[in-house]
Image (cartoon, rainbow, N blue to C red):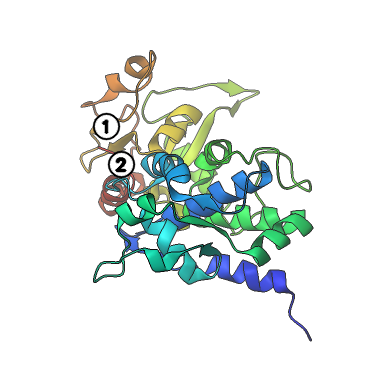
Amino acid sequence: MTRNPNDELLHRVQTIRVALRHGRPSPHKPLLLLLAIGRHFSGQQRLIAYGEIEGDLNGLIRRFGLPDSRENAHYPFWHLTNDRLWELDRPDLVRTTTSGDPYLSDLREHDIRGGLTQDFVYALDSNPDFSWRVVGNLLSTYFPPSLHQNILESVGLVGRVGPSWPVGTMPRQDARDPRFRQAVLQAYMSRCALCELDVQVAGQPIGIEAAHIKWHCAKGPARVDNGMALCVLHHKFFDAGLFTVLTDFTVLVGGLASGNSVQESLNKYGGSVLQVIPERSDQRPAANFLRWHEEAVFKA
């Protein structure tokens, strides 16, 4: 039986070689793929000059990459070719270091262009469901659900792919334990651990979510001690690395966020202890998961 070419392409997407740091796969290559797919569906040329995409990709890395990531867009731009999803027009003009990394100056000086491979672009254009499977896989493998919509908006993909799914929803790539949310909300009395938000409609909490401390996509277990009840806003802040919680439950706020509402919605909690902590010690956030979040997500 002949294998569907799209299945082979999807397999390449699912097996991208990425570095593992702080127990979290580096999302830089996936961010480049998502950005390139968004540019493709907005009608832009397949091959993109490095200087043209550098700023946008570095912006994505700052927002959604690892906490200690520098502005190193040239790494995924060069190394994604190894995954047979990306190509460069004149790689022979670029010098490399002993570790195989490109000279940034060469990429800029020679206006090196890169883009999705022809077969990948053809599959995206000919099969919208395949496009959304690719996007859904990249998002669910490397990022928590609370950030998916923000990433889609940042790369220009909202409303451009996935006619079989409503805008902003992902085809499920994994199985989540439905009991996790119920157990976490019960342990926190359906109140946000940070701000104590407690809103109910017909006796059911609304606007309160069960946040994984160590993300599900990073093999974090669906256990109460790997969860916190957070309001929708603070769940998004937590997953974006704007604050973390130390092992003594003290809140540590980073300096990434700005705006008129930062003091009231975030900064004022810095240095204080969580407002809501489960009474049972076995339900409180476990130290190993809190340390993972501080190292792998928090943007100090």
| Residue ranking furthest to the top | 260
Query: Where does the image place residue 279, in percent across and percent down from the top left?
Result: 33, 38
Left or right, 247 with respect to 130, comes to left
Compared to residue 35, the image places residue 205 above or below, namely above
180 w.r.t. 196: above or below: below
Residue under label 1, please give it. 254
N-terminal label among 2 and 1: 1
The C terminus: image quadrant = top left
Looking at the image, which residue is at 54% across and 70% down?
A: 84
Whether residue 75 sits left or right of residue 126 in the image: it is left
Q: Dots 2 and 1: beta carbons under 8 Å? A: yes
**Residue closer to the observer: 80 or 46:** 46
Which residue is labeled 2 in the image?
298
Residue 237 appears in view: yes
Depicted 115 relative to depicted 235: above or below: below
Label 1, secondary structure: give it. loop
